[in-house]
Amino acid sequence: MRCAGLQRYLGHDEGRVHVLKGVSFEAERGQVYAIVGPSGCGKSTLLYLLGLLDQPDAGTIEINGQRMSNSDDAARTAARGAHIGFVFQFHFLMLEFTALENVLMPMRKLGRLTPAQMETRAHALLESVGLGAKTHRLGTQLSGGEQQRVAIARALANEPTILLADEPTGNLDVKNSAMVFDLLTRLAKDHGQAVVLVTHNPEIAARCDVTRPMRDGVFIGT
Amino acid sequence: MSPNLRIAFRFLTAKKRAMLMSLSCTVLGVGLFIVTQATTSGFEKFFIKAILGADGAVRIEDKLQNTLRTVSAGNDFAVRSKEAQKYIEGVEEPSLVVAGLKQFPNVLGTSQVIRQNVLVSSAFKNHDSAQVFGINIDEHIKVSDLDKHIASGSLDDFRQTPTGALIGRELADRLQLSLGESFLIDVRNSPPMRFRVSAIYETGVSDIDKIRVFVHMGQARSLLRKSSGVSLIQVSLRDPARAEVEAAQMEETLGYAAKPWQRREKVWIEVFRALATSSGITVTVFTLIASLAMFNTLAMIVLEKTKDIAILRSMGYERRDITQIFLWQAGIVLAIGAVLGSAFGALATWGVSKIPLGLHGIIVTKTFPVAPSPWHYVAAVVTAIVMVMIASIIPARRAAHLEPGDIVRGAAQ
Ligand SMILES: Nc1ncnc2c1ncn2[C@@H]1O[C@H](COP(=O)(O)OP(=O)(O)OP(=O)(O)O)[C@@H](O)[C@H]1O
Ligand SMILES: [Mg+2]
């Protein structure tokens, strides 16, 4: 995945803010990237653009060599389903559904596997984030950290080539954040997925392959 | 189950109370629509059946005098003026007309009738107005349900009694006549004749039961001093629904005015139709409320579930999926509403048909006449589907057009 010269304004009229001021970034398969920076510098905004949830005011985004930044809603939606796993910074789960159903949700839409295969895979994913025993809990019956881990399992459901995670370990204790981080790195190495995560945790940032510090809507130091 | 339907189900359960409001209105709308249509068309059917049973499908009355003048208007124009058409009362050569009618394959039977307004007197009441019908009984029961309408007494008694008479229930009550009692029929300029009540009939149509007296044709001829010709020929058809077409052909070939029952009872039939329409519209108010409630509920769910919508969109669910999820919710409510509403309608129709009514208006009936029809169910359900779906499209499309980026930034709406 590659992006170049991304610009994004947010808000209207006087409240209009220049959030991203020309961000260029490249992520390769099998690598783990950390984006760090102070609160409000535009990390989430960048991730939404990379996740094709939002459209840049200027600049380009390419995924697998295909230009996605100006494509239509249908194409972006299809790409999201097939290539991108996204973990939101806030509000992770659909709360009326169980952990298992949440993980099944993207697989059912994509429809690549049989229902039985989907179930097996969903169980395995929940197991790998340490929630094998709580698969049938509703979203409302899970703690914030547990919800976050289900969200990570869900983001991995369709074996995305790119995983974008906005502070995936923000609500987790040391043990669990280590487990989640290990899981993500293992995936990157084993399946050749690109992992881009935003984090405030210096230890985690230090263990990533590449760390990109950000400030006021631009990467610094490059 | 498709993923969208599954999600729709779960979203619905989150707003149970609002959904129930919409559901109960759908049930009421569908159910009451079915009942009102069953009763109004019950009245109509009852009336038509009674009318056909009493007066037949077509009546041949009055000779058409073909004085259609062709007015030449200038060059090649020819204007036929309708006003020039004249009628001569009665049928002068009934056997010829009957022979002509027999040529129609749809004609089941014919009956020659002499009819005149008369005065009747009993021991209790003098000079009450009535209408005497001179008939040939065996001919007449082939074109009417007179035999089935006999409420007391017997047709055999009538057949065997030359001065026998069949008298309507309401007229009998008015004159306080019972079976076997005698009464006088008075025609202007001639001495009254005495008749005996052989049987009392009840057609169910008040206008008939309160004035008609049936007597033998021979008696009627001497009473009315009419040695030849008849007033009308009553015709029954295998398929009464075709009466209008057949009557038009009869007029053409016979040269007599032929009145189909649809034209004869036009006023009442239109009243019933108007009643069915207006009650249908009234009851549709429930369906309207159901659709407004549905609009409201879905709009609420859309607001509450914007984040879920963003999550779904981030996972690859398309705009179309989001629309579907919300339309499914309406669909689920409609499906349940249609089933429960139809059951409620069927039950209520059955209940209504058991209500002892004792009606004595234009029709006389002991219980509520109902005529359930699958089309009423179809119409009720289709109305509900159309109205609720139209109301649901707006919130569903709104949900589909939310931008996931805007939602996650909290900037939606
Ligand atoms: N709808 C909006 N209108 C105007 N400005 C906005 C809007 N949403 C966000 N911003 C601004 O955009 C900037 C970047 O926001 P963003 O969420 O990307 O920050 P962040 O780096 O993810 O911060 P954090 O670490 O706290 O999550 C912030 O300064 C914020 O105030
Ligand atoms: Mg952020």
Image (spheres, coloured by chain):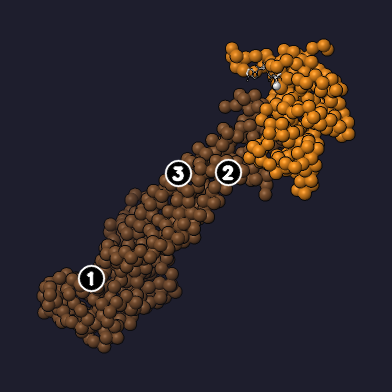
Chain colours: A orange, B brown
Between the C-alphas of marks 3 and 1, the distance is 45 Å
Is B142 or A14 nearer to us in this picture?
A14
Q: Do the residues labelled 1 and 2 touch (CB within 8 Å)?
A: no
Is ligand 1 closer than 8 angstroms to the Cβ of mark 3? no
Name the residue tied to disc 3. Answer: B288
Residue type at the position of mark 3: Leu
Residue A47 falls in image quadrant:
top right
Give me the disc on residue B170: 1
Please state, as top left, top right, bottom left or bottom right, where the C terminus of chain A lies in the image. Answer: top right
Q: Can residue B117 be seen in this view?
A: yes
Give the mark, 3 or 1, whose residue is nearer the N terminus: 1
Q: Are marks 3 and 2 on the same chain?
A: yes
Say which of marks 1 and 2 sits in front.
2
Left of B166 or right of it: where is B408? right
Q: Earlier in the sequence, mark 3 or mark 2?
A: 2
Image location (x, y in percent) of residue B118: 17, 72
Q: Is residue A24 left or right of residue B365?
A: right
Marks 3 and 2: which is nearer the front?
2
Residue flagged by tag 2: what amino acid is it?
Thr
The chain holding disc 2 is B
Give a yes or no on whether discs 3 and 1 share a subunit. yes
Chain containing the residue with disc 3: B
As drawn, which residue projects farthest toward the right? A190
- Residue that protrudes farthest toward the bottom in the picture: B160
Please determine if labels 1 and 2 lie on a single subunit: yes
* Image side of residue B129 versus residue B290, left or right: left
Q: Which amino acid does label 1 sit on?
A: Glu
Q: Is mark 1 on a helix, strand or loop?
A: helix
**Badge 1, how many Cα within 10 Å: few under 14, some, many 20+?**
many
Percent of width and height locating residue B399? 60, 34
* Mark linked to residue B13: 2
Foreground mark, 3 or 1, reads 3
